[in-house]
Amino acid sequence: MANGACDDGLPAAGPLHVAMLATPGMGHLIPLAELARRLASRYGATATLLTFASTASTTQRAFLASLPPGITSLRLPPVDLSDLPRSATIETRMRPPASWPSSPTSSARTDAARAAGVGRTYLFNPTNLHMLSLLLRLPELDATVPGEFRDLAEPVRLPGCVPIPGSDILSPLQDKGDPCYRWMLHHAARCREADAILVNSFDAVEPEAAAVLHRQQEPGRPPVYNVGPLILTETETKSSLRAACLEWLDRQPPRSVVFVSFGSGGALRTEQMRQLALGLELSGQRFLWVVRSPSDEGAVSDNYYDAESKEDPLVFLPEGFVERTKDVGFLVSSWAPQIEVLAHEATGGFLTHCGWNSTLESLVHGVPMVAWPLYAEQHQNAVMLAEGIGAAIRVPEPKRKETIAGAVKELMAGEQKGAAVRATVAELQKAALEGVGEGGAATTALAEVVDKWAT
Ligand code: UDP
């Protein structure tokens, strides 16, 4: 399950120390570390981030080393994953390392924390209220939905949520025969055992779900606190790659560039990558594309944990593409300084896989999105962003160069839908920034949680 558990381990009267167990992957570690940073700066707390040696990468090590002295980390010993079949999903691969100390998955953390004498356990959901609503209702859906979600004729309706077509429901729930489904179900039921659930979202982006989860107390459900958006606040711009890509942006007109990136591990199929290249070219827009080698086996590349393409990704682009687009496009292999790119005034749009960190980073910087979801809860996020709040335009199926070009052009320059999306994102940016400011909703929610720790 995509979350971490935080346990306050010291007597109420002592200084606050928080232990945080992070699910593998930078996308989970970053918001948890930001939560630690916020607790440290506002409340003088110290924190220990528990990570897994099996999934430690250079990026992760550098990130942990950059945290302030009060935020330390501990690596739990490696777990042998060699007995998992090659076809095991990324969620299944995450599950064994997330066992602490021995039983698999994340609710095992609650047991481990209790066994260690920690009184209270808080779940941190690094995604959003739509995802949490799904998890909270999953046992009920399991009992009532016949067959697979993707075969449902009607969308799944959850209280306060945008109706989600069955095929867009969280990808590890799409095959009830896969062990991953059973594990998700087991842990979804155990979410209710937490003392409270902290969520990396903010009310304005999913207002009706927030109304249901904050204002309606349901017996047996822990209180829910929206403490987001928590995004990376401190970045460094040292490498020449960072400099090159930002320098290129410096030479482009304001709001003229569409940034294209699929998160830390997203990979396209070879043909989709070709169509994307041709679509960007056809759109006539400037673009900055983080190109990663395609994968025809699945949407998550083997490099989820280290983000480095194993082969030169540029060789997979259509012939002549690099030359033809050299005046309007900039290609980066594997990894770009995303936050700085989104914060740059030349960036006017983001073609994204709708990973939740990327989504929040885009909203905080006021950048409207084209949605191209790949795996995990990204399809749900795309539905919520495109059909719910209206912060994104989803690339219509089938994804061909014409449909891709259409969505990109509409986002960047369209006077109807594009203009509406751009205006909505400007409003959401304001709400996001207000929320984390003094007296804002996220700041107040976190203060309520900390108050509980003091009692
Ligand atoms: N990221 C980045 N450069 C890249 C790709 C990703 O800095 O080239 C960062 C991005 O800013 C975000 C995280 O990696 O903080 C990706 O998290 P997200 O939840 O969007 O997607 P995931 O990687 O979990 O699929």
Image (tube, rainbow, N blue to C red):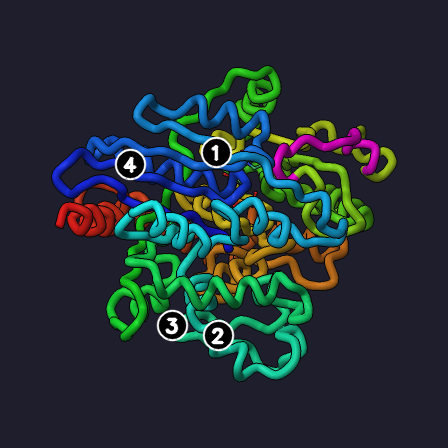
Q: What residue does disc 2 label? A: 139
Magenta span contains residue 306: yes
Residue at image coords 61%, 37%: 305
Label 1 packing within 10 angstroms: few (<14), some (14-19), many (20+)? some
Q: What residue does disc 3 label? A: 160
> Disc 2 marks which amino acid?
Pro
Q: CA distance from mark 4 to mark 2?
A: 34 Å
State if disc 1 and disc 4 touch (CB < 8 Å).
no
Q: CA distance from mark 1 to mark 3?
A: 31 Å
Task: Say whether mark 1 is within 8 Å of ligand 1.
Answer: yes
Residue 30 showing in the rendered view: yes
Q: What residue does disc 1 label? A: 339
Asked whether 67 or 263 is in front, the reply is 67
| On screen, residue 152 above or below 169 | below
| On screen, residue 67 above or below 380 | above
- Direction right: furthest residue: 319
State if disc 3 and disc 4 touch (CB < 8 Å).
no
Nearer to us: label 4 or label 2: 2
Q: CA distance from mark 3 to mark 2?
A: 18 Å
Is 18 displayed left or right of 206 in the figure? left
Label 3 packing within 10 angstroms: few (<14), some (14-19), many (20+)? some
Q: Position of residue 129 (x, y in %)?
A: 40, 61
**Occupied quadrant, residue 267:** top right
> What numbered label is drawn on residue 209?
none
Nearer to us: label 1 or label 3: 3
Residue at image coords 52%, 67%: 185
Q: What residue does disc 4 label? A: 38
Q: Position of residue 142 (x, y in %)?
A: 54, 77
- Could you say whether the residue bearing mark 4 is in a helix, strand or loop? helix
Boundaries of the magenta span: 304-316
